[in-house]
Image (cartoon, grey):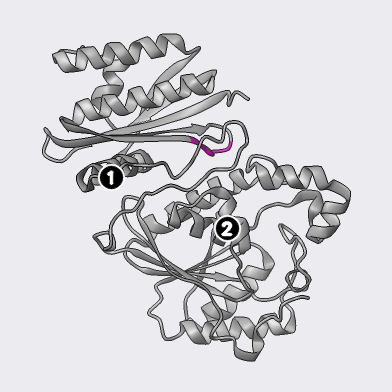
């Protein structure tokens, strides 16, 4: 199945210029934001510009192989973008050969355009290039974190180990909280954009959350706009004396016609569609939202938080799917990892978000503050 319109993000780097170099590139579905393919490699000793062109060529080759009809190339290298757009001349001999190779692939594609973007908007390609350089330095082979999903197959995890130490710098510390218990969460029903309210125990759970967080020097609270998260965040905000900011990006997935049903009930009347939804993140419930679309807006919400509260401690009050997606992204796990994670009502997870895109998961689904208030498992 052809992905149609895609975005190629490419970058390259050299530690020394020239020095040990590598490139990274990815192809993203333009409609959903799902990463269809990742490429990266160490290329020995080279300059930044050579590495950037190598990343461009890898991204274009992948778009061609996937059968893309319309390609937008996004790079933070103004030199490469201007040269490939025909506005700047290619003078260096090494660049001429690489530019010619890239141009040949461009001619083989139906439509290609080049866009210069700020470095922070090209962080995924930059991350891949650095991973490739790290792997080259360590004498190991780089492997992708995302397999080819253009045919709807599930992604598979690869080895993208950064090292034993945490990334350098002061992170934005996210204390990510799931809202308290609701009638739908108690019965394990699809609970998306419906405005379910907290149960009596859910309200008590929110109070326990607030008491736990009171010992943390929290700088800000950001909440999903839905009622159950607003109720939970209001209790926390009142105790901590912090005004709650609402970000629609952290809302739960819209489950459309599945809202209010159990998994078993949906399987009974829409078994084939449910299986397709589990197998392909681009499939949405009838009248609802796909996992891929949810992932795009959650990632954008995370970016807003890390930009607004850089280096600070932020409480994010959200729902099962957005929290799982944040954890999945931090771990660079495949999309279907979200179906392997469990999050209890009023649980706390913790992620350090570093500049440049690196993340460290420090805590997941902690309910130690709930005691007897923990929601009992449904049997």
For disc 1, the neighbor class at 10 Å (few under 14, some 14 to 19, many from 20) is few
Q: Is residue 174 above or below residue 330?
A: below
Q: Which residue is mark 1?
A: 140
Q: Is residue 156 visible?
A: yes
Whether residue 286 appears in this view of the structure is no
Q: Which residues are magenta?
A: 32-36
Residue 65 position in % (x across, y down): 49, 21
Q: Residues within 10 Å of mark 2 (few under 14, many from 20)?
A: many
Task: Name the magenta segment's main secondary structure.
Answer: loop
Q: Which residue is mark 2?
A: 322
N-terminal-most mark, 2 or 1: 1
SS assignment at label 1:
loop
* Residue 35 covered by magenta stretch: yes
Residue at (28% x, 25% y) in the render: 54
Image check: 238 left or right of 140?
A: right
- Residue 65 lies, with reference to residue 224, above or below; the image says above
The image quadrant that residue 129 belongs to is top left
Residue found farthest to the bottom: 372
> What residue is drawn where x is 63% and y is 25%?
1
Q: Which residue does the image show at 58% across and 37% down from the upper left?
A: 32
Asked whether, in this view, residue 69 is left or right of residue 85, the answer is: right
Quarter of the picture containing the C terminus is: bottom right
State left or right for residue 345 relative to residue 45: right
Above or below, 70 against 233 in this view is above
Left or right of residue 356: residue 149: right
Taking the magenta stretch, the answer to whether it contains residue 335 is no
> Which element is circle 2 on?
helix
Instruction: Locate residue 234: give its quadrant.
Output: bottom right
Residue 323 on image: x %, y %: 55, 62
At x 33%, y 61%, the residue is: 310
């Amino acid at each position: 199945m052809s992905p149609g319109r895609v975005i190629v993000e490419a970058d390259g780097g050299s530690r020394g210029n020239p020095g040990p170099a590598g490139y990274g590139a990815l192809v993203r579905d333009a409609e959903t934001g799902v990463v269809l393919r990742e490429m990266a490699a160490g290329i020995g000793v080279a300059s930044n510009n050579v590495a950037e062109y190598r990343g461009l060529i890898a991204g274009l080759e992948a778009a061609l192989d996937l059968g893309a009809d319309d390609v937008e190339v996004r790079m933070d290298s103004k030199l490469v973008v201007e040269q490939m757009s025909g506005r700047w001349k290619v003078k260096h001999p090494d660049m001429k050969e690489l530019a010619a190779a890239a141009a040949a692939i461009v001619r083989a594609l139906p439509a290609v355009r080049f866009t210069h973007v700020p470095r922070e908007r090209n962080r995924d390609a930059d991350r891949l290039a650095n991973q490739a350089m790290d792997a080259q330095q360590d004498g190991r082979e780089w492997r992708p974190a995302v397999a080819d999903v253009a045919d709807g197959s599930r992604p598979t995890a690869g080895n993208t180990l950064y090292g034993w130490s945490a990334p350098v710098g002061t992170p934005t510390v996210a204390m990510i909280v799931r809202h308290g218990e609701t009638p739908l969460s108690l019965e394990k029903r699809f609970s998306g954009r419906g405005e379910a309210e907290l149960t009596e125990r859910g309200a008590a759970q929110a109070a326990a959350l607030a008491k736990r967080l009171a010992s943390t020097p929290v700088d800000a609270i950001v909440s999903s706009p839905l009622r159950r998260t607003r109720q939970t965040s209001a209790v926390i905000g009142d105790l901590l004396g912090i005004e709650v900011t609402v970000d629609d990006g952290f809302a739960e997935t819209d489950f459309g016609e599945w809202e209010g049903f159990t998994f078993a009930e949906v399987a009974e009347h829409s078994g084939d569609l449910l299986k397709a939804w589990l197998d392909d993140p681009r499939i949405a419930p009838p009248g609802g939202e796909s996992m891929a679309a949810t992932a795009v807006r959650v990632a954008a919400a995370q970016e807003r938080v890390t930009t607004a509260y850089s280096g600070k401690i932020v409480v994010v009050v959200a729902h099962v799917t957005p929290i799982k997606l944040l954890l999945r992204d931090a771990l660079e796990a495949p999309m279907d990892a979200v179906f392997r994670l469990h999050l209890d009502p009023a649980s706390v997870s913790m992620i350090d978000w570093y500049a440049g895109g690196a993340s460290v998961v420090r805590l997941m689904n902690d309910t130690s503050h709930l005691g007897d208030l923990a929601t009992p498992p449904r049997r």
